[in-house]
Amino acid sequence: MTNTKESVFTQVKASLLDPYNISIQDLDLMMSGMLSKGIDMGDIYFQNIHQESWTLEDGLVKKSSYSSRQGVGFRSIIDEQSGLAYSESLEKDSLFKAARASSSIAKSGKTATSKIDEPSSLENYYSSVNPISSLEDKAKIELLQHIDALARSKDHRVKEVIASLAGNFQNILIINDLGRIVADIRPMVRLSLSVIVEEGERKERGTSGGGGRVDYTFFNQSKIKNYVAEAVDQALINLEAVEAPAGEMTVVLGSGWPGVLVHEAIGHGLEGDFNRKKTSAFSGLMGEKVASSICTIVDDGTIKDARGSLNVDDEGEPTEKTVLIEDGKLCNYMQDQLNARLMNTKSTGNGRRESYSSQTIPRMTNTFMLGGSHKHEEIIESVDEGIYAKNFGGGQVDITSGKFVFSANEAYLIKNGKIDRPIKGAMLIGDGPSALNQVSMLADDLALDPGIGNCGKDGQTVPVNVGQPTMKIDNLTVGGTA
Amino acid sequence: MNHHQDKADMALKYAKSIGVDESSVSFADGEGFSVTARNGAVETVQDYKDQSFAITVYLNKSVGAASSNDFSETAIKSTIDKAFSLSSLTADDECNGLADKERMATEELDLDLYNPWNLDIKKAKTMAIECETYALDFDEKVVNSEGATVGSYMNQSLYANSHGFLGVSKSTGHSISCTAIAAENGVMEMDYDYTSARHYDDLQDHKEIGILAAKKALDNLGSRKIKTTKAPVIFSPRVSGSLMSHLMSAISGSSLYRNSSFLVNSKDKKICSEFINIREEPHLKRGFSSCYFDAEGVETTPRFIVENGVLKGYLLSSYSARRLGLETTGNAGGHHNLVLEPTAEEDMQSMIQNIGSGFLVTGLIGYGVNIVNGDYSRGANGFWIENGQIAYPVSEVTVAGNLKDMLMKINAVGNDPEKKGSIYAGSVLIDDLMIAGE
């Protein structure tokens, strides 16, 4: 199946409009109805979501579930106000009713007409193949069983293996107040692995996984081997872990997942809504130096097959590579249309919504710090005493004060320029603007996380990628117990 | 009669006709709205209208599950077909199946969960604007806000299974919240307050919520780090419930049979200080997690989870119970309302006076909790206490320990619980936790 713009549009139309006899003219009528309420901006968002998951436990795939969901969201915007209503029934009556409800913020009526254009042309950063049917169900089960066998054969201390495979496939059709109509087909797969190891009284967990906007054939032998090795090694290393230190110290962060730092410490603070409302610790700092001069940070929704990539954002705007911070200077925020309009700038293709039933807000896609000039080893060697945090779980930030946390789940002490004993999981806490100014060395090993990250904001979860090279931060608080 | 009963009957009959051994279905629908105001004007108005249907089928000893939000007969049938086809692919497990028929709830209880708020969007807008205005006008240092939100939601759900059990529940939820931002010397601090209830007449006044949000944001101004130290820590009622949540994860059936909890094999053993009692109260009137039957139709019963520091029972569904060779505790779908009983006639204020010096935690961020081994490390903010009084606000520190040890070191539970959710826990004092700062 090729994904030219015509075939994507035809497929999406066949999936979302044709079964309910909805014509382009009907869409025109719905949009005209919304425009007649005097709105500044508006859009109609058709979506269906198909997802499945398969879970292995006790060496067997005993659980599987499938879900399908559909709905249409109607968004009306006047000035800073936005109204959202949606319908989960795609029958025409329900749709016209929801379109009217979305205009409860409307000004007095005026007549308006909409004229829907030909579907816009799109870049394709991922395939439009349904991942759920990319592999026979039996092969999905065998894949998980193979992972289980591999993990158990790696070490006798592996006592539990839980592995799951999930596929998600969405058809999306967006019609906006300018008469633009855009279709997108969004595939996603994810493999997650968790192992429990035991030795004497001690028990530890190790986790790994990967995925992206691809199909199940992405999970080839070498990837599987890496996931298994990563989870088992992490758990075994943690069996040896000693108490983590408490207090301020030099922290070296590994490449890839530790990019959670970039996402939390600075990414959220550069989302357009917080800056328009002046509630971000980075508000009003455009053009100012907010990070050490070796830091360049970008948000790039156009990376091929990446989990956070989108052909278009949820307002139908093409995604971009946006440089947020260049050589330490703040140069761009991430914008959706509402916030861009109110800040007299243009959308950067960062308007995202969890689904048809959620508001569109500025969100990250794939956000990462570019690599530097040092070697990973040089950075470790430069530290007399500190910690090396190789892998991370999640993080969180308070946008307004800039305080952020992220939790290390594989970390080591560094002594005299050498990796020393592993330490137990600990929270790292800092202040976004100060932490970024403390970045003193970057390695040439930029990597994105393996494609399992989610980001939560205003109760909405969207898939993202994070990334960074090995990074040295001169001073950060480590929340250990020793 | 619930308006989904006919559909439920049809679905169960259809499942039986295609050859499944046992099945259960649930239908839920809800509607409501929320209005957010900021800078004295309405910012968002959102209408909610959701519905969902889910089926679980058992074929021999294997299981399949599917769900959809399309309530047409064709969609319901094809969802059941999908669950059936999955059940023919998944492996058998002796522990699969509906909960035992004898355990199905028989007595329907009126838990007073339904009380629609006669509030149109226009009134809600006025209320949200007023709430935010009270925050902004409280003090000139309150310079901004993330807005005030007024929301109301009603939900109806039905669960039925092939034992012939059918249970329905109808509930409402209403809330008012406000997030205020205070600034001083170019540094901003944000804080919030909210009220939520099943009945709107149990809500706090919206103006008071605005004022409280403003006061909390102001209290945080001038916050600083403290030196890394070990000290007694008071978890305020706003955050103490999180300790209960961690305990609940550790005693939930799936963590136990997967051997991935620090409380494996702890039933009838002492896990907390001996004066700690935790009750599970599924039948609290107007409770957020009140229900007379659990997600499998099993009758729920009020009980002690922890009595005099001893763990009296786990949180089990029929599946996890069979895995562990035990009986279900009526916790398919999770815990019901929890009450951490006060250990003394004291509240946060008297605890502050009593400890002399220590750390009062009013906010926690990040999920640095490892249920497998109990390791605990979270970002915290709050206030440093000196000479039995609040000395100054603290931020950018962590509190860390091990939950096994922390539960044993709970020194007091206050009689000042917040009742805004399903966990009622007052201030909790824990001796000697590591606080990492400068």
Image: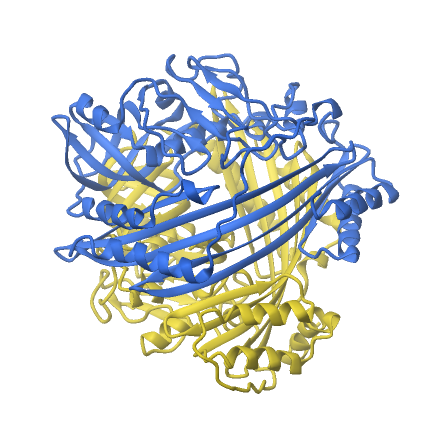
Chain colours: A yellow, B blue
Q: Answer above or below: position of B257 versus A97.
A: above
Quadrant where the C terminus of chain A is found in the figure: top left
Q: Position of residue B13 (x, y in %)?
A: 84, 43
The answer to whether A317 appears left or right of B431 in the picture is right
Q: Toward the viewer: A302 or A412?
A: A302
Q: Position of residue A164 (x, y in %)?
A: 62, 44
Q: Residue at x 29, y 29 (%)?
A: A481
Q: Toward the viewer: B422 or A46?
A: B422
Q: Position of residue A33 (x, y in %)?
A: 56, 79
Q: Residue at x 16, y 26 (%)?
A: B357
Q: Is residue A442 visible?
A: no
The answer to whether B276 appears left or right of B305 in the picture is left
Q: Residue at x 48, y 72 (%)?
A: A76
Q: Position of residue A176 (x, y in %)?
A: 52, 78
The answer to whether A209 appears left or right of A432 in the picture is right
Q: Toward the viewer: A345 or B11?
A: B11
Q: Toward the viewer: A172 or B43?
A: B43
Q: Answer above or below: position of B261 versus A394.
A: above
Asked where in the image residue A357 lies, by quadrant, the reply is bottom right
